[in-house]
Amino acid sequence: MKSLGTMLQSGDWKGEKHVPVIHAPEKVKKGEEFEIKTLVGEEIAHPNTLEHHIAWIKVFYHPEGSKFPIEIGNYDFSAHGESEIYTEPYVSFKFKVDKPGTIHTMSYCNIHGLWENSVELVVED
């Protein structure tokens, strides 16, 4: 049986328009709210048309020492040309953590499949 993990694609977001970009601070204070932005197509624009679009972005946080990541958000982009409305795959949100860990982001292109990226987060007292 083929694992979903084997189908996740990755790369340098500066040279591949499908890789989700994560803008987050490298260090945060324990329990203090901070902002994260994640998007697809920062350096090389993604078309986002009816025929070729990013359908969703998911964001997870995997605290250091925890067995599983925690889903922080699931963002669907459903307007792909209906009535000449086009969504851009860009989200911004805030959250707080008590432990260092990894922010994982996945995106789905209707033609090119699943893409991932991650960044480490340091948490200071």
Image (cartoon, rainbow, N blue to C red):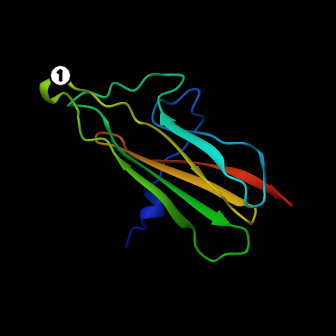
Of the 4 image quadrants, the one containing the N terminus is: bottom left
x and y, in percent, of residue 45 in the image: 44, 22
Q: Is residue 30 left or right of residue 69?
A: right
- Name of the residue lying farthest toward the left: 83
Q: Residue 89 falls in which quadrant of the image?
A: top left
Which residue bears the numbered disc 1?
84
Q: Is residue 9 left or right of residue 53?
A: right
At numbered mark 1, what does the secondary structure look like: helix, strand or loop? helix
Residue sitting nearer the eye, 32 or 77: 32
Residue sitting nearer the eye, 25 or 120: 25
Q: Is residue 41 left or right of residue 75?
A: right
Can residue 20 be seen here? no
Q: Amino acid at mark 1?
A: Glu
Q: Is residue 76 left or right of residue 99?
A: left
Residue sitting nearer the eye, 53 or 79: 79
- Name of the residue lying farthest toward the right: 125
x and y, in percent, of residue 102 in the image: 67, 57
